Image: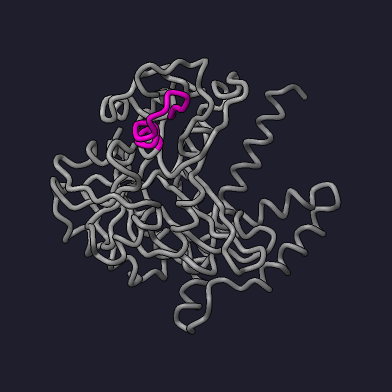
Amino acid sequence: MDLKDLRDKIDAIDDELVQLFVKRMEISAKVADYKKANGLPIYVPAREREILQDVAEKAGPEMANYTRVLYSMLFELSRSYQKKRNTQATPLYQNITHSIESTDKLFPQAPMVACQGVEGAYSQIACEKMFKAPFIMYFKNFEGVFNAIDQGLCQYGILPIENSTAGSVKKVYDLMISHNFSIVRTFRMKIDHNLIAKHGAKLSDIKEIYSHEQAINQCSAFLSTLNGVKIIPVENTAVAAKMVADSGRTDVAAISSRYCEELYDLDCLADSVQDKGNNRTRFICISKNLEIYPGSDKTSIMMVLSHKPGALYKVLARMYVLGINVIKLESRPIADRDFEFMFYFDLETSIYSEEFVQLMCELDDICEEFKYLGSYTEVV
């Protein structure tokens, strides 16, 4: 047989498969109705294990694993369909709906905002890009920003969450586990790092360089060319610039922004010293209250999964079934819990879509703990 004949046979088999799949889903719907009427759970793991074992044996050694994968996906499709038929609005979805209806249509113009660092910090620059005329309170560390939101000192907080060169800001992710908040907006900002020092300083004379650890990582190639220079991490790039300005020394420098060069009256010894020209940092804007503004098309969630093979696969399979794009997946260990992780997801889905509604009503059933962090738009 030639290729066309083989493809014709596959097409004929596919026709049969589609008809059988539709019949299976129709019977699955009747199973869902029976379970609902009799108060039975949709997910019965023992039943699924029994079927997987049976079909693997029927398929034979060569096709056993492929068959398990196929039927695992069929189970996800079936459970999703059954859940959709039985779904009632959960308290979470009711809360989301209320927030959509009650949140002001215009993003706030002049709120009180918490930022980490001092005047000139990149968080401050991001804050002023998000808000028209914010009132800014500065805090020494990221935890101070979270606490300011918890205690109601500020309406919003600005935090860096990831960088295109250095990756995730792990300290922020760790703090997200232990604080209650909502993400209301994100901002992706181009970062240009400059080596700045006091007037009269020369690059060849520099003995110490201060900066935040993320900025140091983003400029590793440049720093590797400086022999004998001590690199000192500090709380913030703006703090680094202020330390240099207050030091009275011409043998120290900071990796910081052009804004800080002007703010602290310093000279630029080398500009754009980051490893990549397209160096961008993503900032989140957090609030104590759930606020969902019009046009929100991204959602962030956190969840704890059972420490079993396939636990993450089941979550990703459910999102795949619903056609929801995962644009970020991060895992962080949970303190005081051996080998347990919090998984952080960024999802691309409109809050008005049927798939978003269904996912928000299903996630509690496929993970041990689930936390909705908010839906928002991202500005650049």
Name the residue located 53 percent from the left edge and 72 percent from the top edge. 42
Residue 247 in magenta?
Answer: yes
Residue 165 position (above or below residue 53): above
Image position of 296 (left or right of 174): left
- The number of discs equals 0
Residue 265 in magenta?
Answer: no
Tell me residue 345's x, y (percent).
Answer: 47, 51
Q: Quadrant of residue 89?
A: bottom left
Q: Nearer the viewer, residue 187 or 7?
A: 187
Name the residue located 45 percent from the left edge and 41 percent from the top edge. 162
Image position of 353 (left or right of 136): right
Q: Is residue 352 visible?
A: no
Q: Nearer the viewer, residue 166 or 205?
A: 205
Q: Quadrant of residue 102?
A: bottom left
Residue 167 position (above or below residue 34): above
Q: Quadrant of residue 155?
A: bottom left
Magenta stretch, residue numbers: 240-254
Tell me residue 136's x, y (percent).
Answer: 22, 48
Name the residue located 49 percent from the left edge and 51 percent from the top edge. 171
Tell me residue 97's x, y (percent).
Answer: 25, 62
The C terminus appears in which quarter of the rendering? top left
Outermost residue toward the bottom?
38
Image position of 168 (left or right of 154): right
The N terminus appears in which quarter of the rendering? top right
